[in-house]
Amino acid sequence: MFGVEDEQLFMHNVDGRDLIIPVERYGVKMLSIGFVVDKNSPVLWRGGMASNALKQLITDADWGELDYFLIDMPPGTSDIHLTLVQTLGITGVIVVSTPQEVALADARKGIAMFTGDKVNVPILGLVENMAWFTPAPHPEERYYIFGREGGVKLAEELGVKLLAQIPVVGSICEGGDNGAPIALEDSIAGQAFMHLAHEAIDAIDARNEDLPPTIKVDVAKR
């Protein structure tokens, strides 16, 4: 999606530690398992191996000074999620779902996991992805092919903020495939992602004003 799938990773020494240098594109530093495995082969890792790899990408990299540190997690409630909250004090979680009920069921479980007593990570808000289809020649038209406002209703039901609704637009896929994120464009789809970014920043600021910092989860004590 950033056009960096063939980049090589390098390491350098920082205060006696060999740290991975993140790849940077469009002002965004990034690391991914995709950089260290064959892109044509499946990653057949058990939960422990994947968890260790996640910890290494977080703690063994020279991230430097960052405005925000985002981690794109797989759906579900697995070892990966538990490892994350044991490794970092997470400011908050943004839950992404499509409008149909089968996807909303997973979103409910994710929200329940993060807000439960053992994890206790705030939910910054919910994003409804693929909210409607808009043909490029007719940007005013909306076709609700995956259901209508399921994410809106879930946000109201659970009392979380709806940060944005992202439409299905062909240029989003094309931009990702070409390594040029749609947020770089001044288009309806690009504006939707920019709106989401602003809403996320506002949600983080509000969370930090109202709540104390989140601490890492210590399963042994719970």
Image (spheres, rainbow, N blue to C red):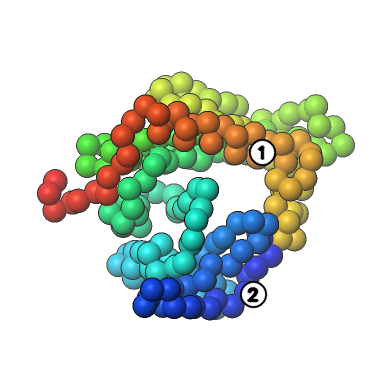
Residue 187 located left or right of residue 204? right
Residue 24, given in percent of the width and then of the height, sits at: 61, 64
Who is closer to the viewer here, 75 or 100?
A: 75
Rendered view: 218 above or below 53: above
For image coordinates 47% across by 39% down, the residue present is: 94
Question: Which three-letter amino acid code belongs to the residue tagged 1?
Answer: Met
Residue 67, given in percent of the width and then of the height, sits at: 52, 48
For image coordinates 22% across by 37% down, the residue present is: 117
Disc 1: which residue: 194
Residue 201 located left or right of residue 144? left
Rendered view: 127 above or below 84: above
Residue 190 located left or right of residue 114? right
Disc 2: which residue: 6
Which quarter of the rendering shows the N terminus?
A: bottom right
Residue 42 seen in the current view: no
Residue 49 located left or right of residue 156? left
Rendered view: 208 above or below 171: above
Who is closer to the viewer here, 208 or 75?
A: 208
Question: Which three-letter amino acid code belongs to the residue tagged 2?
Answer: Asp
Gap between marks 2 and 1, in whole Å? 27 Å
For image coordinates 42% across by 41% down, the residue present is: 93
Dot 2 surroundings within 10 Å: few (below 14), some, or many (20 or more)? few
Residue 29, given in percent of the width and then of the height, sits at: 57, 60
Residue 57 seen in the current view: yes
